[in-house]
Image: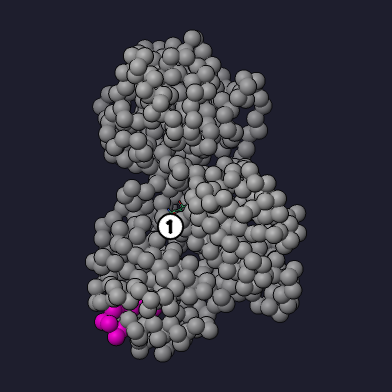
């Protein structure tokens, strides 16, 4: 949830770390700080608010340093104050560290340390780690870190410096992301590749409990049992432009508009339109296990959970394979009925979501086979799962997920097609579906051309306090996703419902002040949804309908109609979500909200 950047090398570390923090602000943005290290010791600067403020404070100091660690925070323990901002420094002023994660036993450790006379200066869980390292230090920082962490229970990504070893950064991780990168006589540590991409594409992924030691001479990595280990250097394949706005006002808008390309990328080399089939290299050897499993589970959080719901419906409808979906946060605690004959799909954009990682662990403990559907290459979930598929959406910086959702659903559609063909779907049906999928990028292009119309509608509804989203079948998760997008970035309360459920309760809320978004494609439930819309109109509700291009009847009942190209239920969710993403975006902009960094949220939730 927080962002970490560290630099050691021949240049001034400050601009590198500041720029890195700016690129990581989407991960947490309530306060930030930097610790500089040189022969005179540690120099600390912390502020509440954004990295620009920190940059201003440093500019006044006119200082420089070849070593620095920085942090941008999303508060968990203690409010966003300067004292609680990272880096945290030990009582003797010699150890400084930045931390991402949660120290679960911090209260016990803090009591023990206070009883022994240690004085804390923040409310954070992190500060106990600084204190422990300080106490364990006898001339070698990595040994002190190892000793200190043997007392710690929890999740961490850490970068640490010590005033007595001014040419060293030590870093380690457990359950929170952290990478190291190799430049030209300079070395980096970061919680996210985006932070250092400008300087290096050569990345080393640290595994849990490994310790990295960065000096001006290079990087050494040690296993938890202190042995030096050789780590592979991975080449990052995406470019700096992908983590920049590229002329768009917000990352979210850029990401919405990139979907023709990202959907295409998710299908590239996988969709077989001539055969009416799909090929997923990463799962090829698992297809038999998926088909013959006793249970198939999808587990995920938030937007990825909505994609999972669509996956479940498609598996059942088209491949006739019974499946279940469970929130990752619930999966772990409800003693799931999974065993060696179960397949669990973990879906995650970031690949770092703590709840999803915990669900994976639970499934593994019960001997299930866990497969990943993930965006971030080399992420924890990608590494913790037995096999899987990357969605290839590229870096998603906007906190509200958009392009990752459509890419997740694209991959789930490909997988469904593959399984359905093996389960007896006819050539004709396979061909029809594969060709509809092939048209998706161009259909999405068409939808994006409606952006101005959607922006006009958004102006009429930006002052609403509540919204209701209705959809049926595969469009019910789309309604949930539309509502989540609106909540996240505009702070308007919104709920998604299966359309027919409206009359079982939510109808009581309907009046002129509560807009309804009804997803009403011309499918088998069309007449029923039209009736639902009429029920809304009879109660003076205002309706924005998503309808199939060419549908003229709907104009008589809805206040506004957003047209969507004709779609199969296979491809409908991907198309229908696009206008809803745009509607949320333009409403949030109209309300003056910070679209890319909405309040209280962070891009990847690395705490349970
Ligand atoms: C989406 O807009 C959200 N910010 C959030 O619900 C997100 O989808 C969820 O936290 C799961 O993240 P993941 O896909 O990275 O695991």
* Marker count (numbered): 1
Residue 9 as seen in the image, left or right of residue 455: right
Q: Nearer the viewer, residue 136 or 503?
A: 503
Q: Residue at point 37% right, 52% down?
A: 596
Q: Residue at point 44% right, 30% down?
A: 105
Asked whether mark 1 lies closer than 8 Å to ligand 1, one says no
Label 1: how many Cα within 10 Å (few below 14, some 14–19, many 20+): many
| x and y percentages locating residue 102 in the rendered image | 43, 35
Q: Residue at point 31% right, 59% down?
A: 490
Q: Quadrant of residue 237?
A: top right
Whether residue 255 is visible, yes or no, is yes
Up the image or down, 584 lies above or below 186; here it is: below
Q: Nearer the viewer, residue 63 or 307?
A: 307
Q: Residue at point 44% right, 33% down?
A: 104
The quarter of the picture where the N terminus appears is: top left
Q: Which residue is mark 1?
A: 254
| x and y percentages locating residue 435 in the rendered image | 64, 74
**Magenta run includes residue 463:** no
Magenta highlight range? 537-545
Q: Nearer the viewer, residue 365 or 599?
A: 365
Q: Nearer the viewer, residue 63 or 396?
A: 396
Q: Secondary structure at mark 1?
A: helix
| x and y percentages locating residue 284 in the rendered image | 73, 56
Residue 167 as seen in the image, left or right of residue 31: right
**Magenta run includes residue 542:** yes
């Amino acid at each position: 949830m927080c962002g970490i950047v560290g630099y050691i090398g021949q240049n001034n570390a400050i601009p590198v770390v500041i720029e890195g923090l700016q690129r990581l602000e989407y991960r947490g943005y309530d306060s930030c700080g930097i610790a500089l290290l040189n022969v005179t010791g540690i120099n600390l600067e912390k502020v509440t608010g954004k990295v620009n403020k920190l940059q201003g404070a440093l500019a006044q100091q006119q200082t420089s340093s070849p070593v620095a660690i920085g942090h941008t925070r999303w508060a968990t323990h203690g409010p966003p104050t300067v004292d609680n901002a990272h880096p945290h420094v030990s009582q003797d002023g010699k150890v400084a560290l930045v931390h991402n994660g949660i120290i679960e036993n911090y209260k016990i450790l803090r009591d023990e340390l206070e009883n022994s006379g240690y004085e804390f200066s923040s409310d954070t869980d992190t500060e106990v780690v600084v204190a422990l390292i300080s106490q364990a230090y006898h001339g070698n920082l990595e040994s002190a870190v190892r000793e200190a962490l043997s007392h710690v229970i929890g999740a961490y990504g850490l970068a640490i410096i010590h005033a007595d070893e001014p040419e060293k950064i030590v870093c380690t991780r457990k359950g929170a992301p952290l990478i190291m990168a190799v430049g030209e006589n300079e070395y980096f540590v970061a919680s996210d590749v985006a932070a250092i991409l400008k300087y290096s594409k050569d990345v080393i992924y640290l595994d849990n409990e490994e310790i990295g030691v960065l000096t001006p001479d290079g990087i050494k990595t040690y296993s938890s049992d202190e042995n030096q280990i050789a780590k592979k250097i991975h080449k990052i394949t995406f470019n700096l432009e992908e983590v920049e706005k590229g002329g768009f006002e917000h990352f979210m808008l850029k990401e919405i508009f990139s979907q023709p390309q990202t959907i295409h990328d998710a299908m590239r080399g996988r969709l077989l339109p001539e055969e009416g089939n799909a090929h997923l290299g990463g799962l090829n050897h698992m297809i038999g296990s998926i088909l013959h499993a006793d249970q198939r589970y999808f587990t995920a959080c938030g937007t990825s959970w909505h994609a999972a719901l669509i996956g479940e419906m498609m598996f059942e409808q088209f491949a006739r394979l019974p499946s279940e979906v469970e929130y990752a946060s619930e999966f772990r605690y409800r003693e799931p009925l999974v065993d060696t004959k179960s397949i669990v799909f973990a879906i995650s954009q970031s690949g770092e979501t703590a709840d999803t990682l915990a669900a994976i662990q639970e499934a593994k403990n019960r001997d299930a086979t866990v497969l990943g559907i993930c965006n971030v290459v080399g992420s924890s979930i990608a590494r913790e799962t037995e096999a899987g598929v990357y969605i290839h959406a590229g870096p998603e910086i906007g906190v509200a997920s958009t392009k990752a959702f459509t890419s997740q659903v694209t991959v789930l559609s490909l997988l469904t097609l593959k399984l359905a063909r093996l389960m007896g779907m006819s050539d004709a049906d396979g061909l029809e579906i594969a060709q509809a999928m092939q048209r998706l990028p161009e259909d999405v292009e068409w939808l994006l051309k409606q952006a101005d119309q959607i922006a006009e509608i958004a102006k009429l509804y930006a002052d609403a306090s509540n919204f209701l989203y209705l959809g049926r079948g595969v469009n019910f998760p789309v309604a949930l996703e539309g509502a989540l997008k609106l909540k996240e970035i505009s702070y308007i309360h919104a709920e998604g419902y299966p359309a027919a459920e409206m009359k079982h309760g939510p109808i009581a809320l309907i009046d002129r002040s509560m807009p309804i978004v009804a997803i009403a494609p011309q499918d088998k439930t069309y007449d029923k949804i039209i009736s639902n819309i009429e029920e809304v109109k009879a109660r003076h509700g205002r309706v924005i309908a998503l309808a199939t291009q060419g549908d003229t009847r709907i104009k008589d009942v809805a206040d506004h109609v957003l047209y969507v190209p004709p779609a199969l239920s296979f491809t409908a969710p991907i198309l229908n979500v696009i206008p809803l993403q745009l509607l949320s975006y333009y409403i949030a902009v109209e309300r003056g909200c910070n679209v890319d960094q909405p309040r209280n949220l962070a891009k990847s939730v690395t705490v349970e």
